[in-house]
Amino acid sequence: MAARFASVFGAAPEGVWQAPGRVNLIGEHTDYNEGFVLPFAIDRTARVAVRRRPDSGIRLLSTFGNQGLTTADAGSLERGTAKGWTKYPLGVVWALQQIGLPVRGLDLLLDSDVPRGAGLASSHAIECAVISALNELSAAGLDTRDMVLATQRAENDFVGAPTGIMDQSASLRGGAGHALFLDCRDQSCRLVPFDAEAAGLVLLVIDTKVSHSHAGGGYASRRASCELGAEVLGVKALRDVGMEDLEEASGLLDPETYRRVRHVVTENDRVLQVVGLLGSAGPAAIGPLLDASHASMRDDFEISCPELDLAVEAARAAGAVGARMTGGGFGGSAIALTPVAAEQQVRAAVERAFAGAGYVAPEIFSVRPSAGAMRLA
């Protein structure tokens, strides 16, 4: 990568940094409701080679797509003007400027094997690799909490996606063999052992090839429903609504808002149950909670799609111990926690089901919990 950078930009990079994508084991749409999530960093990463420039010019190039070399000026970045993947590194530069860090010009080459549009946080992997690089190169001294909030600001205010802090937290804080139990209210977190292999299991990702975008209206409308529910129920966030409060909430909210609230409340409870089980019974015991999470997202939050439902149903019928859609919804990927002995039959069953329904063939691959963002060179 350093050689490619030098051939494009005429000098060696000052370093190469990487940050992983993530799979969310459980806890969907709970993050912006100040709730609990349990993601893990995966062994698919975005890598950036970076060199600072003496002027305010920014030059960006990726190894994928056909966008070619993109140029910008660090002194005149404006929200809503960047296109394609470049809005993620430019958003980080902009966000750092907003908190008073004098980020100037740079040359950047991006390479990534995190599938795009698959609900595996490919955009956050880019942002976390970039902020790791700029934090070090500018000697900014940002801690992980600061970097999480800066990348959230880039997503929310520059890219225009109303996301929470889960994805970048997993990418920056992940650990090999562990999931990240994160409290999105205060960013407190701890690593929870999740060693599927030791339990004779594999976690399969089923990329449905139905592309999704957090900047779209479906995600924003779900967030608005949650904010309405919290306002009507008189709480700061839906994190403050317990399972015991749902009966009363059903009489105060319109049916749709109530379903949205019920998903968030029950999903928070499922996260806590999964964390408990991973610490006692182990990964094989969490299957029913994965199934219940998918049903809640399908029926109460209404963010699934026929391809995701079919992936989950086919995987479960073929032997997966549990399966659910993962990510923001409206497309993307499902995960299937599967006995190693049943892996090939699950893969084959999902592929047959998609072919029979006339859907585009899914991409199916395994992931394992991996380390968070780091400098490579």
Image: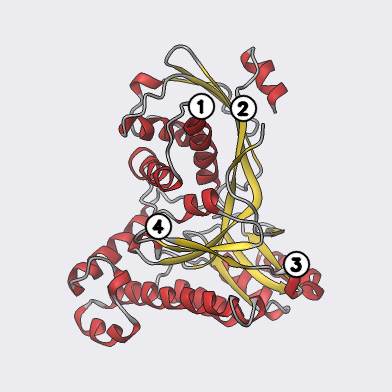
The label shown at residue 15 is 2
Neighbour tally class for label 1: few under 14, some 14-19, many 20 plus, Cα within 10 Å: some
Say what secondary structure mark 2 lies in.
Answer: strand
Residue 263 x %, y %: 39, 74
First of labels 3, 1 by sequence position: 1
CA–CA distance in space, label 2 to label 4 = 29 Å
Quadrant containing the C terminus is top right
Residue at 55% x, 44% y: name it. Answer: 125
Say what secondary structure mark 3 lies in.
Answer: helix
First of labels 4, 1 by sequence position: 1
1 up-or-down from 192: above or below:
above
Residue at 39% x, 61% y: name it. Answer: 184
Type of the residue with mark 4:
Gln
Front residue of 297/354: it is 297
First of labels 3, 2 by sequence position: 2
Q: Are marks 3 and 1 in contact (CB under 8 Å)?
A: no
Residue identified by numbered label 4: 187
First of labels 2, 1 by sequence position: 2
Residue identified by numbered label 1: 137
Residue identified by numbered label 3: 347
CA–CA distance in space, label 3 to label 2 = 39 Å
Residue at 53% x, 76% y: name it. Answer: 274
Q: Quadrant of residue 242?
A: bottom left
Q: Are marks 2 and 1 in contact (CB under 8 Å)?
A: yes
Residue 290 x %, y %: 56, 75
Residue 213 x %, y %: 46, 50
Front residue of 212/130: it is 130
CA–CA distance in space, label 2 to label 1 = 9 Å
CA–CA distance in space, label 4 to label 1 = 25 Å
